[in-house]
Image (cartoon, rainbow, N blue to C red):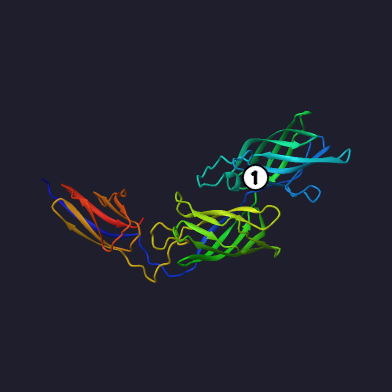
Amino acid sequence: MKRFRIFGMGVLLWASINSHAAQTAQATLFCLSVRFHRATSPDGQFTLDLTTLNPSVGLNGELAPTFLDPPERGYYSRFYEYDTIFDEGFDGYIQFDVPMEADVDDNGFADFFETRQSVSGTTTGDYDASPLDRGTVKAIWSRDAGSKDGTCRIQMKSAMFGQLPDFVHAFEIIEYTGPLIYTPDTNKVSGTLNLTQTGDTNSQLAGPIEFTKSPTNRFDELTLGHEVWTDASSQTNHISNDFDSFFRDLKRKTNYFGLVEFDAPDYNLWLLSIDDVNDSDGDGIPDFSDDPGSATVRRPTVLLSLGNSNLSFSISSTIGRTLEIQETTSLSQSNWATVSSFAPTNDPQVVTLQRPTEGTKFWRLRVP
């Protein structure tokens, strides 16, 4: 039997953290409604507006999510068509989808709502202006990457009159981005948001924010408090209590997301995405929802001992922090192989591996 050599290496990627220190995450707030601007028929005779308000009250251009279960059509609005020659109009209800399927960057959010992504596609729906008319709808969408503005060509086919003139609407996605400065605590996370609308630097939204950690899953589930945010015109926006659950994306690890609803008559439903790459103790849980550390986090230590048929790693570390034992046959290689991944339940924790029979091997303890 050939002899082999054993080498142990210290802990990598471990850092001390400061208790209750303020951190900065990046926040993005997407409005789930789409704003449509007035369109005019090619001959100039008709105009078409969308609105979730009664047309007699106002035309707000909103195409809003239905949240029907199951969804017949994903988005709806009222429409108001006006004849400029005969000075008369009629209204009805219209439903059609927005192109939600594309997610090029695989971040869990539809490209349609992210201004940095381009959008193209065709969706279908229907309209109802009973008893005058009803029919089908085809919507052809286009928006360039980096722009909040795009076009949507609406083609309506009447059950009574056949194909109607096309209406080409300018539409816009409403997106705010900016820093979220937060201070983590044992049972909550509190901080302030300062957001600016993409494509309109004069439009801002700012205010306090607070989350309560779930007592059963404090790292991955939080509850949003009902704060008041102020826009650039000093108008207040009250967060309602209809939606308040936030979750950590267990695929991306550093992202938290949830719905935000404002007490407003229109454009009231939003999605808030929070990205936090801060991970002071290197345990894979962002500081945003992690437990605050002590002034100096204890660095793990490891003692390696050799048995007749195995190797024993006696590891002293914080209980519950995920650790990895990795090995390689040469320090010149960068591809260390993980041979054991675990969260210590005891201090120290003993991990046993099979003893190699020949060659040279190196081991290291790593916090992923």
**Residue projecting furthest to the bottom:** 295
Q: Is residue 81 above or below residue 190?
A: above
Q: Secondary structure at mark 1?
A: loop
Does residue 294 appear left or right of residue 246 in this picture? left
Task: Name which residue lies at 79% across and 41% down.
Answer: 91
Q: Is residue 350 above or below residue 41?
A: below
Task: Name which residue lies at 58% across and 48% down.
Answer: 116
Q: x and y percent of residue 231 in the render?
A: 67, 62
Does residue 67 appear left or right of residue 51 in this picture? left
Q: Is residue 38 above or below residue 229?
A: above
Give the camera-side residue of 295 and 65.
Answer: 65
- Look at the image and tell me in which quarter the N terminus lies: top left
Decide: few, some or many residues near mark 1? Use Cα within 10 Å; few <14, some 14-19, many ≥20.
Answer: some
Q: x and y percent of residue 94 in the render?
A: 71, 39
Give the camera-side residue of 260 and 335.
Answer: 260
Does residue 216 appear left or right of residue 340 in this picture? right
Does residue 139 appear left or right of residue 15 in this picture? right
**Residue projecting furthest to the left:** 1
Q: Amino acid at mark 1?
A: Thr
Q: x and y percent of residue 319 in the render?
A: 33, 62
Name the residue carrying label 1.
66
- Look at the image and tell me in which quarter the C terminus lies: bottom left
Q: Is residue 282 above or below residue 151?
A: below
Task: Name which residue lies at 23% across and 53% down.
Answer: 362
| Badge count | 1
Quadrant of residue 11 in the image? bottom left
Give the camera-side residue of 242 and 294.
Answer: 242
Q: x and y percent of residue 282 in the render?
A: 38, 60
